[in-house]
Amino acid sequence: MSGDQELGAGMQSMMREVQSMADKFKMEDEEQYYSPYAHLEKATVLQEARIFHDPVAVRENPRKCCTVIAQLLHLQNTGQHLSGQEATEVFFGVTKLFMSDDASLRRMVYLFIKEVAETCNPDDVIIVTSSLTKDMTCDVDLYRGNALRVLTRIVDAAMLGAIERYVKQAIVDSSGQVSSSALVSSLHLFNASPENSTIVRRWISETTEATASPNEMVQFHAMQLLYQIKSNDRLGVSKLVTQYSQRNSLKSPLALVLLVRFTSKLLHDEVSEGRTPPGSLMNGSAVSKAGYQFLESSLRHKSEIVVYEAARAICSLPDIEPQELTPAISVLQLFLSSPKPATRFATMKTLAGVAAKNPRVVSKCNEDLEALISDANRSIATLAITTLLKTGSENS
C-alpha cells in the first residue's frame, strides 16, 4: 500500500511539474515581442555613427559599424528622418567605410546609400560614384552586382552616359549575379525618366544576347527588359513573341511564363483592334494562329507553372470557341487532383471564371469538383461549390 502511495505521490509531483512548465510556456507565448531597436534615440545613434571616421575602429570592428548602419536604417524606416545636415554628415561618414574589405559591412554600405540617397543633397551623392564605379569594375562578383544596383539608383541621364559602357558589359557578363543585377538596374533606369529610357533602348543587342544565357534568372530578367524596350512598338512585340515562341531557346520556366503573358496580351490586342474577328483564333490573322499554337504547345511543357499559365491564358482569351478551350480545360482537370493547395486553388479560380461564360465546357470536370467540396482548404471548397452550381444540371 505504501508503494502505491509513493507511486501516486510521484505521479502528482510529475503532473505539477508538467503543468508548471505548460504555464511557463503559455506566459512566454503571451508575451509581446519587442524589437531591440524599439527605444533608439536619434541623438545616441548619431553619436555612435562617429565611429565611421575612425579608420582603426572601422578596420578592427566592422560588426559594430554594421550595427550602427542598421540602427540608422531603422530610424529612417520608422519615420525618424535625419535632417539635411545630419544626413550629409552621416553620408560622408559612410563613404569612408569603403576602406574596409569586410563583405558584410560593404553590403550594409550599399544598402544605406540606396536608402538615404534620395534625402541627401544630389551634389553630396555624386561623391560616392567614384567608389561605386571602382567596385563595379573589381573582381568580386558580390561587389560588382551590388555596386551596379546602387549606382543606377543615384545617377541621372548625364551621368548614365559616362557609365553606360560598364552597364552594357555587365549585362553580358559571364556571372549570372552580375548580369541579373545589370538587367534589373536597367529596368529601374528605364522607368525612372524618359531621358534614361532613351539611353537604355540602345542596349537592345546586349539584352537580346542575355536571353541566351545558361542562367535561368538572367533569361527571365532579359525578357522583362526586352519587352519594356519594345512595349510601344506593336510590330516589335509581335516579332519578339514570334521569334522566341518558334526558336524554343528559352530554358527558364519564369522566362517562358513571361512569354506566355506577352503572347496573351498580343492576342487580346489583335481582337480588340479588329485585326482578328471575334470567334475562332485559328481563322484569324497569322499572328493569332501562331500565338494560339504556342499557347497550346505550352500546355505540354514539363514545368507546372508554364502549363498553368498557358491554360489560364487560353481561358482568358476573348470570344474563344469551346473546342479551343478543351485542351486547357483537360490540363486544369488534372491539376484539380494536385497535392499542392496553391495549384488546386489557382485551378479552381480559373475554372470558376470559365464556368461563368462556358459552363458546358467545365461540366466535364464535375466529378473532380465534387471531390473538392470536402477539401481542407475552405476557399477551394467554396469555389468548387459555386462552380458546380453553374455547371451542374437538375439531374446531377
Image: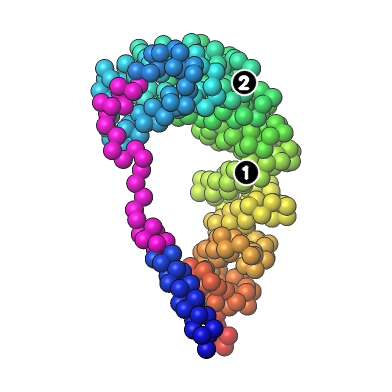
Rendered location of residue 56, percent (x, y)? 45, 13
Closer to the camera in the image, 93 or 212: 93
91 left or right, relative to 3: left
- Tag 2 secondary structure: loop
Nearer-N-terminus badge (2/1): 2
Q: How many numbered markers are drawn?
A: 2
Coloring scheme used: rainbow
Rendered view: 202 above or below 220? above
Residue 201, picture quadrant: top right
At 31% from the left edge and 27% from the top edge, which residue is drawn? 45
Determine whether 361 is above or below 120 in the image. Answer: below
Per the image, is 95 magenta? Answer: no
Nearer to me, 168 or 300: 168
Return the residue at label 1: 254
Q: Quadrant of residue 391?
A: bottom right
Residue 225: % across, % down: 56, 32
Residue at image mark 2: 140
Q: Which residues are magenta?
A: 24-49
